[in-house]
């Protein structure tokens, strides 16, 4: 509860700070525009005044400015024409045109976002599969609490399957990796039944009350809990809420969606805690 409370406070502070910075930037741009606008009016007023210096031809001065502007316009049109010819030549020869800097930045950001999504979903897959194996082994060697544990684990695995399926559906896998989400989904679906089969095979030689069995089970449970805690705190709460473009930058219209997502996360955590209490 303390973790969720502190995270909610940080989420509110981040959203209000981002919104305040965006408003300040908008006012700053507006002030800069009005300042430059006033300078342009002042410059226009100065140039429109007649000159009182002896021997100065103001009309000639205007003609000089017009000739300079005409030459600059001609240079700009020539450069644009040359760029258009280069692009058309590149298209005709099958070569890519010269990319613009902002296009390269967007491509780099898309590549980094794709790589981060792949790493996140692989870590989450490893965590839930490892946890499912431990659950299957525990269910196979349990005694009188089998019925209660079975019902709880059915709901538990259903929620984890929904979470993993959502992550796999969001990641835009490349053409060479179209089969990856299906393989990962099948691996998750088979992890618990295979672990149950292994546990049933080793049930006769397994002593649940021995110190060695308790130590091994405690080690595996701690590893599984650590992986799931890392996935929930880092990959979900930090990455999705604080650093994802879905909720950042936070605008007034996106706060409702942000709070709705936070409420869904709290509801899911409460349901999992309730299942853990029953188990």
Image (tube, grey):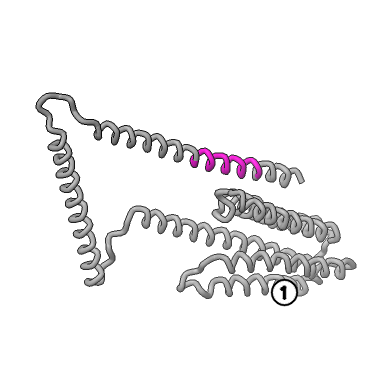
Q: Residues within 10 Å of mark 1 (few under 14, many from 20)?
A: some
- Image-based side of 142 in relation to 179, left or right: right
Q: Examine the structure image and report whether residue 220 is included in the region drawn in magenta.
A: no
The region drawn magenta spans 12-26
> Which residue in the structure is indicated by mark 1?
193
The local secondary structure at tag 1 comes to: helix
107 versus 67 height, above or below:
below
Is the C terminus in the top left, top right, bottom left or bottom right quadrant?
Answer: bottom right
**Residue 157 is drawn in which quadrant?**
bottom right
**Residue 243, position as x, y percentages in the image:** 56, 50
**Residue 225, position as x, y percentages in the image:** 71, 55
Residue 28 visible (yes or no) = yes
268 versus 161 height, above or below:
above
- Image-based side of 140 in relation to 24, left or right: right
**Residue 245, position as x, y percentages in the image:** 54, 54
Counting the numbered discs, the total is 1
């Amino acid at each position: 509860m303390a973790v969720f409370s502190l995270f909610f406070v940080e989420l509110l502070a981040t959203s209000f700070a981002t919104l305040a910075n965006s408003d300040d930037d908008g006012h700053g741009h507006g002030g800069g525009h009005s300042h430059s606008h006033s300078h342009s009016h002042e410059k226009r007023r100065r140039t429109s005044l007649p000159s009182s210096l002896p021997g100065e031809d103001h009309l000639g001065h205007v003609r000089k400015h017009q000739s300079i502007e005409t030459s600059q316009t001609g240079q700009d049109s020539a450069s644009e024409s040359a760029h258009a010819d280069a692009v058309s030549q590149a298209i005709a020869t099958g070569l890519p045109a010269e990319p613009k800097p902002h296009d390269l930045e967007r491509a780099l950001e898309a590549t980094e976002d794709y790589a981060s999504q792949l790493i996140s979903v692989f870590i989450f897959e490893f965590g839930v599969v490892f946890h499912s194996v431990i659950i299957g082994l525990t269910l196979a060697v349990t005694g009188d609490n089998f019925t209660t544990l079975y019902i709880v684990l059915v709901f538990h695995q259903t929620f984890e399957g929904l979470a993993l399926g959502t992550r796999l559906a969001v990641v835009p896998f490349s053409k060479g990796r179209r089969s990856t989400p299906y393989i990962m989904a099948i691996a998750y679906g088979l992890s618990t039944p295979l672990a149950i089969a292994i546990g049933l095979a080793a049930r006769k030689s397994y002593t649940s009350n021995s110190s060695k069995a308790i130590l091994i089970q405690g080690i595996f449970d701690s590893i599984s809990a650590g992986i799931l805690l890392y996935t929930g705190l880092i990959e979900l709460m930090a990455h999705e809420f604080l650093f994802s473009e879905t909720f950042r930058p936070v605008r007034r219209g996106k706060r409702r969606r942000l709070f709705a997502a936070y409420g869904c996360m709290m509801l899911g955590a409460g349901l999992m805690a309730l299942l853990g209490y029953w188990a």
